[in-house]
């Protein structure tokens, strides 16, 4: 019951923020979420054994999130500046050898893993409007649901037994079939400027990205020997537990809208 109620409350709040806020106000929300996700991420990588420069990496992550939504900003330049700040701070630390490599990798990953995707969500809102953001989230939810129910019904072959034992290849196939069809149909009404074939192809990319995002977070938590990334959301774990698939799917959707 706790999981259901907190899930409904979280969904209602997210829907209200996306529907009623403009892109600038939504960016403020994204920065708060990015900060919360970073706190969880830092705790995970610390448990694995990596030590990142906390404040420098947090600022770089927030910088990436804040700059990505603006179409006139060169994303590569923003990420390069963010990563340069982090690398300079890490390389001046006293750690050497393999620990230094782990520190550098963990720190550099944060803006790309957290800042870029959450900024992409705001970018989707700025380009395609609130309907486009909800369409992305709905596609991810439909994909996850199809994977779950198909996997539970006919799933036999583990997809990644060492990362997520409950996921099956059959379930993943269900996501690859159902989600693109949903995006092509729903996109006909909410993104009418794009041909259904293009939207279906985008749906395939979103499903693939979502699966990778889910497996990636599972890999981090297993390496850190953690069940959940945090305890902020009753019955659901932490922020990263709720947005793991979205973190990989959002950039795919954003760059589609930005370039096509």
Image (tube, rainbow, N blue to C red):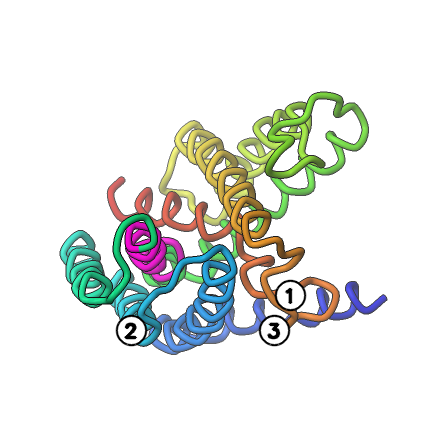
The mark found on residue 59 in the picture is 2
Q: Is residue 136 above or below residue 123?
A: above
* Residue 188 seen in this snapshot: no
Q: How many marks?
A: 3
Residue 103 x %, y %: 33, 57
Mark in front: 1 vs 2? 2
Residue 74 x %, y %: 15, 56
Q: Which residue is mark 3?
A: 13
SS assignment at label 3: helix
* Residue 227 seen in this snapshot: yes
- Asked whether the residues under the numbered discs 3 and 1 touch, taking CB atoms below 8 Å apart as contact, a structural biologist would say yes
SS assignment at label 1: helix
Magenta-highlighted residues = 100-115
Using a 10 Å C-alpha cutoff, classify the residue at mark 3 as few (fewer than 14 neighbours), some (14 to 19) or many (20 or more): few
The mark found on residue 11 in the picture is 1
Using a 10 Å C-alpha cutoff, classify the residue at mark 2 as few (fewer than 14 neighbours), some (14 to 19) or many (20 or more): some
Q: Is residue 4 left or right of residue 184?
A: right
């Amino acid at each position: 019951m706790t999981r259901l109620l907190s899930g409904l409350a979280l969904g209602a709040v997210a829907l209200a923020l996306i529907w009623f806020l403009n892109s600038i106000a939504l960016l403020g929300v994204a920065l708060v979420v990015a900060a919360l996700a970073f706190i969880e991420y830092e705790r995970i990588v610390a448990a694995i054994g990596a030590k990142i420069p906390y404040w420098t990496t947090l600022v770089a992550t927030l910088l990436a999130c804040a700059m990505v939504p603006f179409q006139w900003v060169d994303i590569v330049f923003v990420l390069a500046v963010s990563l340069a700040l982090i690398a300079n701070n890490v390389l001046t630390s006293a750690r050497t050898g393999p620990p230094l490599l782990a520190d550098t990798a963990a720190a550099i990953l944060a803006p790309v893993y957290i800042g870029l995707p959450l900024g992409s969500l705001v970018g989707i809102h700025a380009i395609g409007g609130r309907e486009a953001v909800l369409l992305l989230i709905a596609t991810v939810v439909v994909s996850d649901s199809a994977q779950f129910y198909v996997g539970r019904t006919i799933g036999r072959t583990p997809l990644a037994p060492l990362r997520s034992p409950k996921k099956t290849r059959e379930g993943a196939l269900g996501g690859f079939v159902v989600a693109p069809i949903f995006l092509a149909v729903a996109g006909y009404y909410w993104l009418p400027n794009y041909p259904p074939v293009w939207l279906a192809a985008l749906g395939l990319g979103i499903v693939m990205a979502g699966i990778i995002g889910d497996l990636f977070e599972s890999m981090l938590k297993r390496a850190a020997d953690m069940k959940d990334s945090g305890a902020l959301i009753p019955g659901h774990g932490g922020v990263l537990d709720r947005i793991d698939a979205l973190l990989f799917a959002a950039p795919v959707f954003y760059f589609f809208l930005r370039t096509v």
